[in-house]
Image (cartoon, coloured by chain):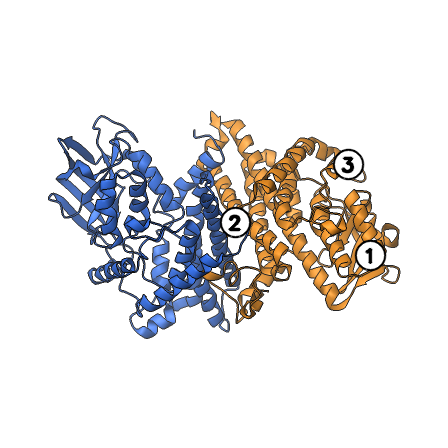
């Protein structure tokens, strides 16, 4: 155990900080769930890519810097410290990217990764269906082979970013006679293909953050099959591992939010506040640090050649409930003004983005496998309790 | 930056855990309850052979020269088996305090002698820190390190008065310790005394935190076994989601308390004067996990969980006690609160490990203390 950054790591932090200070937009971008905001966020992805900061863990050949996971955490810490825009292509860079690296052919990597890194192709995800939510193995959307093409029919739902995105990746049933997690394949589909209809679904904040996607005889070349036919479930589980694990919700996000919470608390100290707030503020700060320390531990383990065990299924519960507590506490501190939708600069200065974050925090315990499902996974796979 | 334990650390901890698991069974713990001293002398002889008491003593003073990080997994193992004897405290609290005294040239040669005897296992030493109203296993101690205000005293057993107090945990042997400062050997007072007591408190809280998380792990393991065996409605009780979720909730708290405790151990080792925040964080997180474990594990045991017969009580009651020893939630949360609200506190994602590291003493870091 040596909790000191190396000189190289400190230099890296400095380099990231300087670049971000010079490039992060002065004003926050509009939400990427609006047309204007989506375009602005895509532009930001291009800016990142020009500096080779799009995905620092990727090999240099794909626009990355070949960084290890500790450097990744440092990058993320600086990224959130700088208040840089959210990653509009997170489905691509954090979920599909690592899967392509592991399971894609050289030709697929060359075709998809650079375009993803440049923000030219922004990805949506297509897991859930109307009758396959938590029970993802109930997927029915079919992809039938026809020569060197697949013909896709069916429907996906809760497809994040699909309204403005360019591509969707998802699981499709390629073997019509198969059941459950057999006979599924991972296929990449352009959203401008003939037969694709995207119907936006407004989220709790009124913006179309996800969508339904209807596939009506959509033809894609079998080049778009990622991994083997029928291998979809195994590959999806690997992706879900990335999602719940290190990449999607890095601790820096919650550390920065809990730092802002401490500042909000300090600024309100003279007002009459709920006495339990002090405890909640402390808990948020401590838990955000605990999540960071745990992630450093996992990163160190992986850097040393180890692998993540079943205990990683604790991650998602911990950060999603932490995110809720941070925002609930902020709402309590804001009191009766918490409900105000900020409209002017002064509103934003006074109320921050807590309301928006509070709404988003409601989704944390639901997406990427509900926390109830996660608790089952912990009980059965980590603790070894009986399945039935 | 490497947050993992070395192979040596893991191997040593595993070996200690194996010995403890074999020797410290629920049955033998219950046997101790029937004895006046509550101590298993045969076990202490065996532990002596492991050379633990001098583990954190520098080589120049006859020890192994290791640090808190090397022992923290073993303290966790002591908690896992609910070891009644204060072995972890002797290693991580008593010996380092004696070392501090010797290092600073305080007191006379009797201190070095007590340290030597502690290492050889021929004497037991108890610490009466002002934050703890009672001392555990005071009656079997040969020497006492005593607090009076900021002052630190050394006294022999015959120089102190003990008023035994019965603990809810039958494994504990508590006593209030009174002494006449005029009879005792004063080792330090004023700022030096305060500094020694503060470092001691941090070591005690760290040691307790590590044991608490070990206790929590053991409670979960026992409950997983029990609910896997016990059948109702034609299937194992543990197959019900409601029961699974009780234990999953504890597992999550344990999983996120551990890295916090390990950082506290590292900080207490490399930068003891800046360890307050890390240690208090560890104690709060560990107590939270352990107390949640007591509630959820009793619940999952059903009526059995409320019986004297069920061994779970050994772990539950220890957790109740340790959660408040070496500073209760109020004490530690107040320290954290004070730290967080300093105007120049280094907060945010880039300061998890201080400015450059926990040992970095550049000026701005003084607020990390």
Q: Provide residue B279's location: percent of width, then percent of height.
A: 60, 56
Mark 2 or 1, which is nearer the eye? 2
| Cα gap from disc 2 to disc 1, whole angstroms | 38 Å
Q: Looking at the image, which residue is at 43% across and 42% down?
A: A313
Q: Which residue corresponds to mark 2?
A: B3
Q: Provide residue A242's location: percent of width, then percent of height.
A: 37, 44
The mark that comes first in sequence, 2 or 3, is 2
Callout 1: helix, strand or loop?
Answer: strand
Establish whether labels 2 and 3 are both on one chain. Answer: yes
Q: Quadrant of residue A15?
A: bottom left
| Residue B77 placement, left or right of B120 | left
Q: Looking at the image, which residue is at 34% across and 72% down?
A: A347
Callout 3: helix, strand or loop?
Answer: helix
Q: Which residue corresponds to mark 3?
A: B45
Residue nearer the viewer, A329 or A161:
A161
Residue nearer the viewer, B309 or B93:
B93
| Cα gap from disc 3 to disc 1, whole angstroms | 25 Å
Q: Is residue A12 visible?
A: yes
């Amino acid at each position: 155990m040596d909790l000191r950054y190396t000189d190289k790591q400190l230099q890296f932090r400095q380099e990231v900080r300087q670049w971000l200070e010079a490039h992060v937009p002065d004003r926050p971008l509009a939400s990427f769930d609006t047309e204007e905001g989506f375009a602005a966020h895509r532009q930001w992805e291009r800016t990142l890519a020009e500096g080779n900061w799009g995905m620092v863990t990727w090999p240099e050949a794909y626009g990355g810097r070949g960084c290890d996971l500790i450097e990744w955490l440092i990058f993320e810490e600086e990224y959130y410290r700088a208040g840089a825009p959210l990653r509009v292509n997170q489905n691509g860079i954090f979920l599909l990217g690592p899967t392509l690296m592991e399971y894609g052919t050289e030709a697929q990597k060359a075709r998809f990764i650079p375009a993803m890194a440049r923000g030219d192709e922004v990805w949506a995800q297509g897991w859930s269906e109307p009758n396959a939510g938590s029970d993802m193995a109930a997927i029915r959307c079919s992809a039938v082979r026809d020569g060197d093409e697949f013909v896709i029919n069916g429907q996906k739902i809760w497809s994040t970013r699909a309204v403005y995105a360019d591509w969707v990746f998802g699981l499709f049933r390629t073997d019509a006679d198969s059941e459950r997690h057999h006979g599924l394949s991972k296929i990449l589909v352009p959203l401008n293909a003939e037969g694709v209809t995207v119907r936006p679904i407004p989220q709790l904040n009124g913006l179309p953050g996800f969508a339904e996607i209807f596939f009506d005889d959509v033809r894609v070349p079998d080049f778009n099959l990622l991994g083997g036919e029928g291998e979809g479930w195994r590959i999806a589980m690997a992706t879900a591992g990335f999602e719940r694990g290190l990449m999607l919700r890095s601790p820096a996000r919650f550390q920065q939010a809990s730092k802002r919470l401490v500042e909000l608390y300090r600024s309100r100290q003279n007002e009459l506040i709920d006495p339990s707030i002090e405890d909640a503020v402390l808990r948020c700060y401590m838990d955000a640090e605990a999540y960071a320390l745990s992630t450093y531990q996992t990163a160190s383990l992986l850097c040393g050649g180890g692998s993540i065990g079943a205990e990683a299924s604790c991650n998602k519960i911990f950060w999603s409930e932490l995110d809720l507590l941070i925002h609930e506490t902020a709402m309590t501190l804001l009191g009766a003004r918490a409900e105000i939708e900020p409209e002017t600069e002064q509103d934003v200065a006074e109320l921050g983005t807590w309301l928006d974050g509070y709404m988003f925090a409601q989704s944390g315990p639901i997406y990427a496998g509900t926390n109830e499902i996660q608790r089952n996974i912990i009980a059965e796979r980590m603790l070894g309790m009986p399945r039935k | 930056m490497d947050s993992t334990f070395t192979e040596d650390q893991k191997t040593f901890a595993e070996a200690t855990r194996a010995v403890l698991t074999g020797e410290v069974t629920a049955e033998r713990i219950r046997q101790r309850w029937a004895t006046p001293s509550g101590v298993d002398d045969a076990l202490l002889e065996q532990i002596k052979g492991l050379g633990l008491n001098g583990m954190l003593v520098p080589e120049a003073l006859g020890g192994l020269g290791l640090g808190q990080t090397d022992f923290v997994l073993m303290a966790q193992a002591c908690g896992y088996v609910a070891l009644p004897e204060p072995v972890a405290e002797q290693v991580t609290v008593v010996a380092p305090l004696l070392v501090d005294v010797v290092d600073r040239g305080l007191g006379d040669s009797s201190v070095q002698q007590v340290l030597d005897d502690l290492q050889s296992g021929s004497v037991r030493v108890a610490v009466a820190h002002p934050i703890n109203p009672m001392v555990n296993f005071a009656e079997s101690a040969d020497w006492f390190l005593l607090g009076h205000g900021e002052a630190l005293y050394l006294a022999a057993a015959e120089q102190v008065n003990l008023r035994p107090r019965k603990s809810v945990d039958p494994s504990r042997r508590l006593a209030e310790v009174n002494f006449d400062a005029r009879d005792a050997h004063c080792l330090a007072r004023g700022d030096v005394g305060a500094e020694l007591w503060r470092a001691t408190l941090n070591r005690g809280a760290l040691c307790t935190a590590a044991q608490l998380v070990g206790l929590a792990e053991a409670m979960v393991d026992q409950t997983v076994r029990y609910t896997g065996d016990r059948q109702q409605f034609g299937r194992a009780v543990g197959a019900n989601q409601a029961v699974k979720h009780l234990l999953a909730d504890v597992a999550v708290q344990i999983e996120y308390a551990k890295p916090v405790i390990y950082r506290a151990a590292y900080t207490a080792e490399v930068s003891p004067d800046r360890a307050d925040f890390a240690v208090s964080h560890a104690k709060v997180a560990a107590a939270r996990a352990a107390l949640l474990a007591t509630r959820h594990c009793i619940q999952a045991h059903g009526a059995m969980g409320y019986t004297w017969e069920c061994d779970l009580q050994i772990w539950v009651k220890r957790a109740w006690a340790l959660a408040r020893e070496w500073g209760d939630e109020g004490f530690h949360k107040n320290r954290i609160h004070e730290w967080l609200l300093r105007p120049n506190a280094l907060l945010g994602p880039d300061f998890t490990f201080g400015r450059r590291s926990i040992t970095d003493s550049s000026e701005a870091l003084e607020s990390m203390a």
